[in-house]
Amino acid sequence: MAAARTPSVPTAGKPLRESSVELVTDYLETPSLDDRSYRVVRLSNKLEVLLVHDPQTDKASAAMDVNVGAFSDEDDMPGMAHAVEHLLFMGTKKYPVENEYHQYLSAHSGTSNAYTASTSTNYHFEVSAKPSNDEEPSAANPSPLLGALDRFAQFFVEPLFLANTLDRELQAVDSENKKNLQSDQWRLHQLEKSMSNPKHPFCHFSTGSFETLKTIPESRGVNVRDKFIEFYEKHYSANLMKLCVLGREPLDVLESWVVDSFSVVRNKDLPLNVWPEEVPFTKEQLGVQCFAKPVMDSRELNLTFPFLDMELLYEVQPSRYLSHLIGHEGPGSIMAYIKSKGWANGLSAGAWPVCPGSPSMFDVQIRLTEEGLKNYKEVVKVLFQYIALLRETEPQEWIFDEMKGMADVDFKFKQKTQSYRFTSKISSVMQKPLPREWLLSGNSKLRKFDAKLIKESLDCLRPDNFKMTIVSRDVPGTWEKKEKWYGTEYTVEKIPADFMEELEEAAASSANERITNLHIPHKNQFIPTKLEVEKKEVKVPAPAPHIVRNDPLVRTWYKKDDTFWVPKANLIVSCKSPLVYATAENTVKSRLFTDLVRDALEEYSYDAELAGLQYSVSLDSRGLFIEVSGYNDKLPVLLEQVLITMRDLEVRTDRFTIIKERLTRAYRNWELQSPWTQIGDYTGWLTSEHDHVIDELEAELPAITAEAVSRFRKELLGQMHMELYVHGNLYKEDALKLTDMIESTLKPRVLPKVQWPIQRSLIFPPGSNYVWKKTLKDPANVNHCIEYWLYIGDKADHQIRAKTMLLDQIIHEPCFDQLRTKEQLGYIVYSGVRAGATTYGFRFIIQSEKTASYLETRIEAFLESMTKILETMSDTDFENNKRSLIVKRLEKPKHLDQETGRHWSQIHSEYYDFEAANKDVDQIKPLTKADMLEFFNHYVHPSSPARAKLAVYFVAQAKSDVTTKQISELVKTLQLDSVSSAQAATDLQARLSAAGHDEEKEIEGLTTYLLHELKVPENKIEAATEAWKGLHTQTGEANGVVKDAEPPTSNGTTATVIEDVRGFKAGLAASAGAKPAKDLSEYEELDAKL
Ligand SMILES: [Zn+2]
């Protein structure tokens, strides 16, 4: 332990610093509006720390980045670094209770997370920034940050790796891996790794599984816990750690706390991790084409070029010059050309670092159309022709200057992000060899134009220095190989000589041999030039916008920014029309219309996007939704073009075909997503009066023609009511002018008020008990899912809201601790408030290999145990929970967009309750434990006759879990001695569930294991595998398998399984529509003169 010390007091302008603490710098290059102060220090153990004093922040935070990751895993134990990240939280000598840290954070509005990357592991948390007396924190009156820091520090001082938590955490790692198994992003990334140089750590499988981290090492006689401790001892050292701490306390106070808690982190003076000996891709792994089969119906062409090591090139960042041009979508670009040929839906390009000492990678990723897939060779040739063009055109300083100018503007007006995002990000940046003064700006700013370095980096983009992957479910139709960890099917071969020759030709082509459409971009007209902000100090920012125009056609809300002072604005228009959701067919037509508008604007809007100006045309729950946001200078220019395109859009058959095909796949792919991301849509559908789920939309799409969309567009834009919000660095006159522009361009007829759409939710009477089931479409998905939803009441009732939110706050941590940590039901365990359009409810979501009905029994068992938790909760804990919730509810917006979003959600919901947070808090404050018990026992407790429940069950098609009983049957056939039997039973359980329910892989794994690990004689193997197959057919019948049982009936009601959704909805009453919190005239600030 560090000796206790008195907090340092500034004297003569210089902080009094412990002699052991070295001041690195107290000057950082910052955005112009940044009101924080910064200091970088190095402790006596060489731990480098960035201290941040933020006088305004709601949340304090800290992040520790440790310079070790999956690249340091031992070859025969993939996932070690990740497992250590999980186990590190499991108790420390000073705080031995395993969930002490999480409990502490949860009681102080906090949250935490961690991630493991290739060369670093990052741990972070955030917590309420003010002490419980709500006064400014100081050394004498510390915020909860002090306690959190001390708990956090212990992970790096003396973690226990508690033995009894080991299996559970490895199960958590295992379900994390299972969650990723069907994700193409993970699959394709691992495929790339698995095909790389086996001598470079890039080839590692980084997540790990129960098999790689326990079953296999234990079968070799390894004590895995010792291994993890050894890994920690070997790689965790203060000199390789970077800490970032942000709080409301003065820098001197933060510094003294850090010294107290972190000086004892051991310094082993380890060398920096660098990998200079091998490269990720040698000649052997380059010049290849790989065909990979995705889970989703997608088509991609991915090209990878080994590039320069960018670690020290932060001043020039030559890759950004190249990705700017290659990734451009404006006239003359690769994308504009291949799109005009009907070959591509998207293109992106950019470099990413692999690790210090190794070359980075430059990737070009193209999303192909059906035609594009047929012509993929042509697409690659276009790319190399463009590269030839770049080689011929010397690096252009004006292009660099344009990029540099925009990067400077973006950095200058950079707004704050959430505290823990900031600390987590910056602690990882601290691992880079940047001058410490540039820790905030180093990655954002471009500083030096260096033509030579740009040319050198362009030289990496050669046909003899790349590999490519063609991702498609149809081509080539057969895949010879299977990737080891994710089972991705693929084939790989050298690029055929004739194709390679064509690429060499393209790369060496002269101007007259190239496609004439290709040229470098023109000057960007969207670069903002007027960046002035008129700042008027206000005591208290206005809580609500005003109505500046209100007539039968349009209602415009407006607020001049009075908080953030950035030269930016947001404009949102909701074009309300009953047509959009009248039928599923209309919804699909509207969706196609918005897709076609965006498609038509792509080339034009790209420059705007580069210049920090974005737009969106989509659907909201009442009609069409238009948004333009960013630097306000050129905002009207972009808005006008968006409106003109909507009005004049010519629905061309060739584009329509491509867009429709893309939407067809998008619908199909949506159903292949993780179950937990789909389930909410069905709950929303079953609890609202009018809604369409994807199944309905998908059924309508095939019949819709280009003419139908064209006709529908006229109807849609012909009559509507518009509600607008203009917020930011604009004046009232600007808001009115923009409104006029919309009106005069679209010229819609007035939609009479009586026809404005009304949204209603369904009301579930006391005692309601429903189940709705759906079989998931993805045949390979092994995960079931449940959304367990309780109806509570009216969304506008602030009593109901306050109690439901407090319940959420109280339940959150014990729910996670029980259902995820202890029971290990699955990686996704979630509880929280779920609001409909007009009603309020509470839900649980669990994604698991266990069936939904089993999950429901576990949720109810947990809820039964909650009564006791509530009853025995100390008054301090109860008050802490209330405080924690209040702090969260009153959290101030951090940037302009966040404030716009909050206001817009009130406008769009039609409650116009801009002071909802304060009203909620007024209701939360007086709540007592007795109130909460009464509320819980009435609305939530499974035995309450008043409880109203809907459970949505998702049923996975893949086999359900292997049971212990099945395993022991199998082991019996092997006639082993009792010690081996016990070992075999544990190993097989993990091994077979790790196989991801792929029977071939299971049998293969089983055979290898029996033969090599258990040394079962070969003549018994066949009998054992046969027995295994036999057991499979009985799955679901054997003892111990949780069958698709009836839902629990603890309150005496039996669940009604919904078979007929219309009948079910017809049986329920619909709520009243939203009612404005105040008469809207109170917000009006109409001017006679326009
Ligand atoms: Zn993890």
Image (cartoon, rainbow, N blue to C red):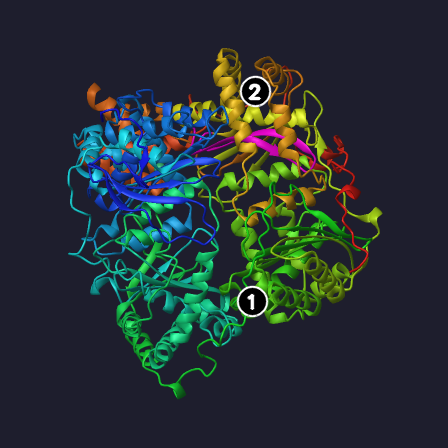
Around disc 1, counting alpha carbons within 10 Å, would you say few (fewer than 14), some (14 to 19), or many (20 or more)?
A: many
**Which quadrant: the N terminus?**
top left
Q: Residue under circle 1?
A: 605
Q: Name the residue under label 2.
A: 1048
Q: In which quarter of the image is residue 192?
A: bottom left
Q: Which mark is residue 992?
A: none
Category of crowding for the residue at label 2, using alpha-carbon neighbours closer than 10 angstroms: few (below 14), some (14–19), many (at least 20): some
Q: Give the range drawn in magenta.
A: 825-850
Residue 779 sits above or below residue 661 on the image: above
* Residue furthest bottom in the image: 512
Compared across the picture, whether 224 is left or right of 414 comes to left
Amino acid under label 2?
Pro
Helix, strand or loop at disc 2? loop
Q: Which of 1000 and 830 is in front in this view?
A: 830
Q: Report the Cα–Cα distance between label 1 and label 2.
A: 55 Å
Q: In this view, does 730 lie above or below 545?
A: below
